[in-house]
């Protein structure tokens, strides 16, 4: 039996960077979203949206509060302006205050995914000769659902990804990163948007048969990534 709690695991430590805003309600339970500022090894930070139930929120979680969360990286489709947009968020399962000096050696941004390749990886090199592969991973969830997670591999991992086929089962380790880009429209206007992806540090092929039906017909909707 598949343990869905183990094929999508993330831990983040950072500071709350925005006010919470209402997201949705399920069976009378409200969910809220706020941004978490997670430090990198450099002086930069990643700004990552997290979704949390009102059941585990409290007034002590305010802007600037340092917290530790455990959860999963999830996706859903948002139909807007006659287009599907893939929206990514960290779904929080546990949240607590993080005191300075507590667990100093903890990785502030760590994710483990076990899923299936649902688009042929795209290999390319940058103008500076850096090797990159873009991967779209379908990670199964309970109730016949899947999360579609964009990932990016570098160097040796990027070269290895060239040989991966749709339906291949892989396990990877990495971190969530955010980046800003400018979206230009046909009317000449533009806006700054933020994209999210998993930067892969390690990956391996799972010793299982390919499971093509794990991708299901929903994989066609992932073309929204290109919009």
Image: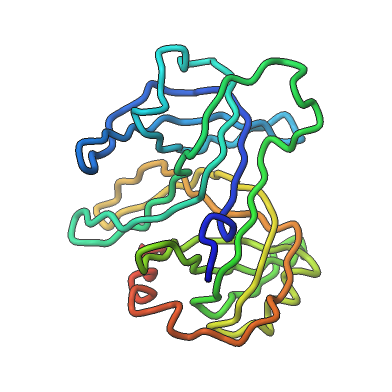
Left or right of 84: which side holds 74?
right
Q: Is residue 205 above or below residue 53?
A: below
Identified at 81% across, 31% down, the residue is 105
Left or right of 91: which side holds 65?
right
Res 115 → quadrant: bottom right
**Callout count:** 0
Res 204 → quadrant: bottom right
Q: Is residue 152 above or below residue 21?
A: below
Q: Please state, as top left, top right, bottom left or bottom right, where the C terminus lies in the image.
A: bottom left
Residue toward you, 12 or 195: 12
Q: Is residue 62 above or below residue 86?
A: above
Give residue 117's position: percent from left, percent from top. Answer: 55, 76
Give residue 142's position: percent from left, percent from top. Answer: 41, 62
Residue toward you, 107 or 70: 70
Identified at 48% across, 39% down, the residue is 93
Residue toward you, 21 or 52: 52
Res 44 → quadrant: top right
Give residue 197's position: percent from left, percent from top. Answer: 55, 53
Give residue 125's position: percent from left, percent from top. Answer: 70, 69
Left or right of 130: which side holds 121?
left
């Amino acid at each position: 039996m598949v343990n869905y709690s183990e094929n999508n695991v993330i831990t983040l430590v950072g500071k709350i960077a925005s006010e919470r805003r209402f997201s949705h309600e399920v069976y009378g339970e409200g969910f809220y979203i706020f941004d978490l500022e997670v430090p990198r090894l450099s002086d930069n930070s990643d700004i990552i949206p997290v979704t949390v139930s009102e059941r585990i929120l409290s007034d002590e979680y305010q802007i600037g509060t340092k917290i530790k969360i455990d959860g999963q990286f999830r996706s859903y489709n948002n139909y807007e302006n006659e287009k599907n947009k893939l929206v990514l968020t960290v779904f929080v399962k546990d949240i607590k205050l993080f005191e300075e000096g507590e667990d100093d050696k903890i990785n502030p941004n760590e994710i483990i995914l076990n899923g299936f390749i649902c688009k042929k990886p795209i290999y390319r090199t940058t103008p500076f000769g850096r090797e990159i592969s873009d991967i779209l991973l379908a990670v199964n969830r309970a109730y016949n659902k899947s999360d579609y997670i964009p990932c990016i591999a570098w160097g040796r991992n990027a070269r290895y990804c060239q040989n991966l086929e749709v339906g291949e089962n892989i396990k990877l380790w990495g971190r969530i990163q955010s980046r800003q880009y400018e979206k230009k429209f046909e009317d000449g206007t533009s806006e700054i948007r933020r994209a999210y992806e998993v930067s892969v540090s390690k990956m391996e092929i799972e010793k299982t048969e390919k499971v093509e039906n794990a991708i299901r017909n929903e994989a066609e909707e992932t073309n929204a990534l290109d919009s």
